[in-house]
Image (spheres, rainbow, N blue to C red):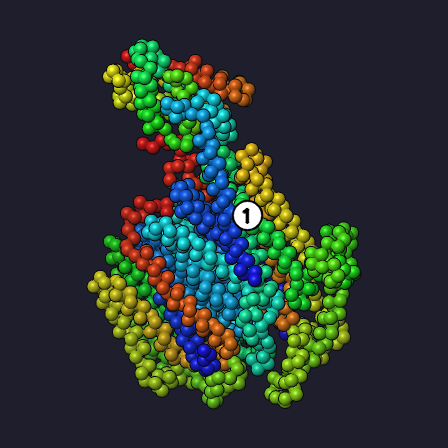
């Protein structure tokens, strides 16, 4: 049986590497589109300043992109390295979107990014513009396929368990690709990327405006970011709401956990704004609730109840017992018994096999699980509520603050009188918000899926590779050390370039170059 | 269905960004057209330059950069040579043309503040730079611009630096339009006349 | 159109080989250039020349590596799981080394400080050296077999360590891949540079082609008595993937079995030697374009020789012979292989078309003058 420590360490390592990776990805996704917009404006109007904008923000894009690629390499290989049972068990399904991500998105993005940086003098204006749009398309498509994969982990449609190969196998790719969880996650995530990039450009442009430098440049950057960003943040919020609309049992458990919905309340359920969830007692202390709001938002109706955690736990208990039976049948099948009735019976309850696997944490043999062990498995069949409760609220709060900021920004960019210093300072100080939002958002998505690696199919603790603790301690330390060093270097370079502003392009038009007269 | 929404959404959002900035461009173009300009030279007038000057002065203070003004006057020249009005206009026009060659578009501000007086604001330039530019303009005009009679044009140029670090008189004046007026007066008053006959 | 399961498995074995070869002939020369950077570039400007010779295209080349991993995951998930978890530390060190490349390329010339640049140059060297070596070490260990086995629920247990991976044969394989990538990188630099850098590149290319030939011959001799693997039970090539349902025997020289059965296969290693010689000749004659083509053929033949020996094995297990992974029992399901086949058939040619267009856009030599004129716009 795999040691708990190894599983914990593997989970920490995946969390750390994934969160690090996602520091850089949303900016890549969003800024690539912003660059395409700026360059489109250049080609449409012919004004050089938009080309300067594309090139300057493009340099910042490059600094960020490098670390996105670096941290992304880790992710592609970590499934095999640290989650080898997962890779075997669901690879038939999970591997395909990853491979398609490579074929469709990575190649396009990485091949054309070189042209973006170095092809200005070798391509026509129209050709280069298409290249920029293709880079943006590539990075967005890569988000698509990885979220098809992740969406399947949350809601495993289109696949069935095969006892001969001991793994999940694809039955319908259409179901996989059009998985509602994948669709919503995709649009929500790319919208988050657009919001991040818009905030980034907005904040830095605001900084230049506050300093009174390069105002023509920064005003135009600000204006583009404001318009694009408002649309983006609206989409993020609407689609975040859409994500709450659940598909699949584990998503229902996740929603209940996020909202600390301990029991199935009379519909429409009340929304808990703040409080202190207590998992042992199954109650939220000092809760401040708004009546009806949760029910209305979560079910878009007044009479559909939101399933509470206690009801979910009881459902899980039933399924775990069924899963024990399924596991027993599976064992006989693996021993070589091919009795017709055995096979039919297994096929009919194999959907509960995952629940049976939950018991493997307590007993290798599963079929001999005691009642205490079953109780324990039931208790741990839902995620921990308190962390989810709070991170979700942080994410939503960030989202609404950013909405306000973008509304203000659009007004300021449209009406000259509204271009006050406080607007720009607000734009500048909200720079960290999108990053806080995306990281808490991913925490909600992945922590909320526990104890499952693949919902109702494969528990997390079974998925890890059978490595030794030291293996992971060493690799985790290596990643943390290297990533921190890289992050420091990247931020240092980024700040240096930001402080220089567009003068770094050496076009003799901008602030730090203006004290010398030509000649 | 969300995939299609995404494609539409990106196009919509991109359009919003582009439309927003094109609106800004249109607004600025409009501003430029409606700025009062001197009909002869197309430079700014005294009124329209005041607002700009105040912005530039604010900017310099915030960035702790120097800011210089050049004051260019043909009053003496006019009195001396008694040219007809249209001849004077032609001369002024040529003078302005040659000044424009030395201007950084979008950065420096040139205005006609009197019948034969011009103001040139050079953000970022300290006094020695301003003097250098002043001398260059003067010798340029002397060498290249001739009146219809063939007389060489002689101008008087004064320069003053406005810097938050100098303890010039300007600092004692309260903020506002009057400060800029005061600057102008200093420019006129502290002119070190440098006429070449 | 749906193919047979066994046909698809063979097709996917070929695709995997294609992707690995694709990486070796694109990313391979980038790795080689990284190793050569401190040696062929004696001044800062020469080093910038070298960096910009590969700069615009190296990221696209690296995707072949990522793609090989992704395709492995999609078509051979068990192989992906076994190889990546077994060669954990080797992969970890490779990853760490690869990290240095995107940063090295992008950040190196962004500061004028010579110490900053020198450090990044060292980083880029490591970023080329380690992966080039590990590539071969990994292949060498495939031929030796890896000490892993399956438990009854198909959990993978590994009994080796990093030191075990660094056995003599695998190290030889590592040296082969290192020298062939250096050869390849040098030839590429000979195409893209002029003057002293190009001259040094030519000398290096010729030298390392020779080294590659010698090492490859050595490995070939070694293989004749290295323990190979052979399936002894009846092979059912179109059943569900279940490695544990077969029997395997091991013995010296068994890796040459395939060559014994199909003598035409000897053409592959023969091609390797011949095209290596042609590489040397073309490089000497200052026709680096042709040299590059021969260099690609050399690398492809070397990899195919190894793959052809292994067939149908992908990862033999040295401690639990029947746990060995072959192409018949470690692939994805029919549905997945089929879908991935069609996706690949559509996108791979597309990729090759636009990649070659990009190379065409960047054709031409990189010179020191060009660096000086465009200093702020280049790596």
User: Which residue lies most toward the left here?
Assistant: C285
Whether residue A308 appears in this view of the structure is: yes
Q: Is residue B93 above or below residue C330?
A: above
* Residue at 73% from the left image edge and 67% from the top image edge: A312
At a point 42% along the width and 27% down the height, the residue shown is: B109
x, y percent for residue C171: 40, 70
Residue B88: x percent and y percent?
A: 32, 16
Residue C334: x %, y % from top left: 50, 78
Check disc 1: other Cα within 10 Å, few if <14, some if 14-19, many if 20+. Answer: many
- Quadrant assignment for the N terminus of chain C: bottom left
Q: Which residue is mark 1?
A: A229
Q: Quarter of the image holding residue C168?
A: bottom left
Front-most of A480 and A444? A444
Classify A320 as above or below B94: below
Q: Is residue A407 left or right of residue B35?
A: right
**Viewer-closest of C255 and A277:** A277
Q: Please, is residue C171 above or below residue B165 in the view?
A: below
- Residue A498 in picture, x, y percent from top left: 48, 42
Decide: is B128 above or below A120. above
At a point 57% along the width and 40% down the height, the residue shown is A411
How many numbered marks does the figure carry? Answer: 1
Answer left or right for A120 relative to B172: left
* Residue at 40% over, 47% down: A43
* Chain of the residue that carries numbered disc 1 in the rendered image: A
In-image side of C49 versus A282 (left or right): left
**Is residue A118 visible to the viewer in this orientation of the structure?**
no
Which sits in the foreground, A65 or C247?
Answer: A65
Disc 1 is placed on an element classified as helix
Q: Quadrant of residue C308?
A: bottom left
């Amino acid at each position: 049986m795999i040691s708990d420590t190894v599983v914990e360490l593997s989970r920490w390592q995946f969390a750390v590497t994934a969160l690090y990776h996602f520091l850089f990805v949303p900016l890549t996704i969003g800024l690539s589109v912003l660059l395409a917009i700026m360059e489109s404006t250049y080609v449409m109007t012919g004004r050089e300043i938009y080309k300067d904008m594309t090139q300057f923000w493009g340099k910042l894009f490059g600094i960020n992109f490098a670390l996105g690629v670096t941290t992304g390499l880790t992710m592609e290989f970590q499934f095999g390295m640290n989650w080898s049972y997962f890779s075997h068990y669901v690879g038939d399904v999970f591997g395909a979107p990853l491979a398609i991500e490579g074929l469709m998105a990575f190649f396009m993005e990485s091949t054309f990014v070189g042209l973006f940086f170095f092809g200005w003098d070798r391509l026509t204006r129209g050709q280069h513009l298409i290249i920029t749009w293709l880079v943006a398309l590539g990075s967005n498509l890569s988000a698509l396929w990885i979220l098809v994969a992740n969406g399947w982990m949350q809601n495993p449609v289109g696949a069935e368990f095969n006892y001969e190969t001991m793994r999940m196998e694809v039955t319908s790719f259409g179901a996989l690709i059009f998985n509602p969880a994948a669709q919503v996650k995709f649009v929500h995530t790319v919208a988050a990327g657009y919001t991040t990039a818009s905030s980034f450009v907005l904040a830095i442009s605001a900084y230049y405006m506050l300093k009174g430098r390069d105002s023509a440049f920064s005003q135009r950057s600000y204006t583009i970011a404001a318009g694009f960003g408002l649309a983006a943040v609206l989409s993020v919020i609407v689609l975040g709401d859409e994500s709450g609309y659940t598909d699949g049992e584990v998503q229902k458990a996740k929603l209940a956990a996020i909202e600390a919905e301990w029991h199935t309340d009379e519909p429409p359920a009340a929304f808990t704004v703040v409080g202190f969830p207590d998992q042992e007692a199954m109650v939220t202390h000092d809760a401040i609730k708004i009546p009806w709001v949760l029910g209305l938002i979560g079910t878009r109706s007044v009479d559909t109840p939101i399933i509470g955690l206690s009801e979910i736990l009881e459902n899980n208990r039933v399924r775990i017992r069924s899963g024990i039976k399924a596991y027993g049948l599976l064992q006989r099948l693996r021993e070589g018994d091919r009795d017709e009735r055995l096979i039919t019976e297994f096929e009919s309850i194999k959907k509960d096999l995952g629940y049976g696997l939950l018991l493997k944490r307590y007993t290798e043999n599963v079929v001999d699980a005691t009642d205490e062990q079953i109780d324990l498995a039931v208790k741990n069949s839902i995620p921990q509520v308190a962390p989810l409760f709070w991170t979700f609220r942080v994410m939503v709060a960030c989202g609404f603050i950013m909405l306000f900021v973008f509304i203000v920004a659009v007004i300021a960019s449209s009406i000259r009188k509204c271009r006050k210093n406080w607007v720009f300072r607000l734009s500048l100080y909200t720079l960290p918000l999108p990053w806080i939002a995306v990281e808490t958002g991913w925490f909600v998505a992945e922590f909320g899926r526990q104890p499952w690696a693949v919902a109702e199919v494969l528990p997390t603790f079974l998925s890890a590779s059978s490595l030794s603790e030291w293996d992971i301690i060493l690799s985790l330390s290596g990643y943390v050390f290297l990533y921190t060093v890289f992050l420091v270097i990247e931020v240092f370079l980024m700040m240096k370039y930001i402080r220089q502003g567009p003068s770094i392009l050496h076009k003799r038009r901008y602030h730090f170059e203006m004290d010398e007269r030509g000649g | 269905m969300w995939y299609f929404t995404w494609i539409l959404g990106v196009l919509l959002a991109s359009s919003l960004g582009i439309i927003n900035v094109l609106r800004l461009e249109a607004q600025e173009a409009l501003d430029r057209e409606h700025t009062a300009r001197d009909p002869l030279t197309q430079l700014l007038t005294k009124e329209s330059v005041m607002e700009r000057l105040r912005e530039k002065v604010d900017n310099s203070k915030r960035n702790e950069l120097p800011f210089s003004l050049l004051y260019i006057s043909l009053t003496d020249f006019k009195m001396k040579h008694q040219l007809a009005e249209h001849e004077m206009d032609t001369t002024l026009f040529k003078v302005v043309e040659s000044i424009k060659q030395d201007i950084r578009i979008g950065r420096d501000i040139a205005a006609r503040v009197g019948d034969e007086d011009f103001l040139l604001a050079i953000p970022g330039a300290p006094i020695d730079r301003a003097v250098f530019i002043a001398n260059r303009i003067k010798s340029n005009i002397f060498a290249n611009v001739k009146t219809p009679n063939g007389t060489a044009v002689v101008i008087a140029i004064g320069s003053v630096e406005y810097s938050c670090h100098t303890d010039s008189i300007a600092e004692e004046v309260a903020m506002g339009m009057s400060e800029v007026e005061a600057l102008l007066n200093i420019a006129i008053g502290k002119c070190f006349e440098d006429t070449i006959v | 159109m749906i193919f047979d399961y066994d046909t698809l498995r063979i097709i996917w074995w070929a695709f995997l080989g294609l992707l690995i070869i694709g990486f070796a002939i694109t990313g391979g020369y980038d790795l080689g250039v990284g190793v050569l950077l401190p040696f062929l570039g004696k001044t800062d400007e020469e080093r910038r020349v070298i960096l910009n010779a590969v700069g615009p295209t190296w990221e696209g080349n690296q995707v072949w590596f990522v793609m090989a991993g992704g395709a492995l995951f999609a078509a051979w998930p068990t192989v992906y799981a076994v190889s990546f978890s077994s060669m954990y530390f080797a992969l970890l060190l490779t990853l760490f080394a690869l990290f240095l490349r995107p940063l090295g390329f992008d950040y190196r010339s962004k500061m004028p400080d010579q110490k900053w640049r020198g450090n990044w140059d060292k980083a880029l060297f490591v970023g080329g050296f380690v992966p080039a070596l590990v590539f071969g070490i990994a292949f060498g260990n495939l031929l030796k077999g890896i000490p892993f086995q399956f438990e009854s629920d198909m959990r993978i247990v590994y009994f080796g360590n990093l030191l075990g991976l660094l056995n003599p044969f695998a190290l030889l394989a590592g040296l082969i891949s290192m020298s062939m990538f250096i050869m390849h990188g040098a030839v590429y630099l000979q195409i893209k540079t002029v003057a002293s850098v190009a001259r040094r590149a030519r000398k290096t290319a010729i030298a390392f082609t020779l080294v590659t030939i010698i090492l490859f011959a050595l490995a070939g001799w070694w293989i004749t008595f290295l323990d190979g693997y052979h399936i002894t039970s009846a092979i059912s090539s179109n059943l569900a993937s279940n490695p544990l349902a077969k029997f395997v025997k091991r013995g010296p020289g068994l890796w040459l079995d395939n060559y014994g059965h199909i003598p035409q296969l000897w053409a592959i290693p023969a091609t390797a030697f011949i095209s290596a010689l042609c590489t040397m000749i073309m490089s000497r004659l200052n026709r680096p374009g042709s040299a590059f083509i021969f260099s690609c053929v050399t690398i492809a033949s070397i990899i195919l020789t190894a793959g052809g020996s292994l067939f149908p094995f992908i990862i033999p297990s040295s401690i639990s012979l029947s746990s060995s992974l072959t192409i018949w029992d470690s692939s994805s399901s029919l549905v997945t292989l089929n879908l991935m086949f069609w996706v690949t058939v559509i996108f791979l040619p597309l990729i090759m078309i636009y990649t070659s267009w990009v190379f065409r856009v960047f054709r031409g030599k990189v010179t020191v003058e060009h660096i000086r004129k465009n200093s702020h716009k280049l790596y």
